[in-house]
Image: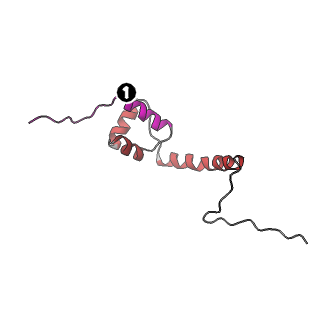
Amino acid sequence: MAKRALHRGWSDEDSERLRAHIARGGSLARATVIFGRTEQALRAHAAVLGLKFLTINELRRRAKGSAPQLEAARIHSHAPRQAGAGQTEPALEENG
């Protein structure tokens, strides 16, 4: 019976894709799907590359911090604002 490889090596291309994914702030969970590897394998290879995935709290802080930037971008792009859940249209004031 032929022996089965226990570890799948990392190609230079895969390493570069992982670097780019982490640089974009990509999550570990999404990387497991993209690369078809376990979280342990991804963390280990990221450490070999001198990188680490952001923690859940770091991802949340980054997302929370980007909300004002998104709002500023919307204002500068003159995109119409859409009323979403919990938002109300501004009341019109009546002049006297």
Looking at the image, which residue is at 39% across and 33% down? 47
Residue 5 in the magenta stretch? The answer is: yes
Looking at the image, which residue is at 41% across and 46% down? 30
Q: Nearer the viewer, residue 65 or 11?
A: 11
Which image quarter is the N terminus in?
top left
Which image quarter is the C terminus in?
bottom right
Looking at the image, which residue is at 35% across and 35% down? 44
Range shown magenta: 1-23
Mark 1 lies on residue = 12
Occupied quadrant, residue 7: top left
Q: Is residue 22 above or below residue 60?
A: above
Image coordinates for residue 42, horizontal then vertical, percent:
36, 38
Residue 86 in the magenta stretch? The answer is: no
Q: Give the left or right position of residue 9, taking residue 51 as reference.
A: left
Q: Give the left or right position of residue 78, taking residue 54 as reference.
A: right
Image coordinates for residue 26, horizontal then vertical, percent:
47, 42
Identity, as a three-letter code, of the amino acid under mark 1 = Asp
Q: Nearer the viewer, residue 33 or 56?
A: 33
Q: Give the left or right position of residue 3, taking residue 74 as reference.
A: left
Residue at the extreme right of the image, as rendered: 96
Label 1, residues with CA under 10 Å away: few <14, some 14-19, many ≥20: few
Residue at the extreme left of the image, as rendered: 1
Looking at the image, which residue is at 14% across and 34% down? 3
Occupied quadrant, residue 27: top left
Image coordinates for residue 22, horizontal then vertical, percent:
46, 37
Q: Secondary structure at mark 1?
A: helix
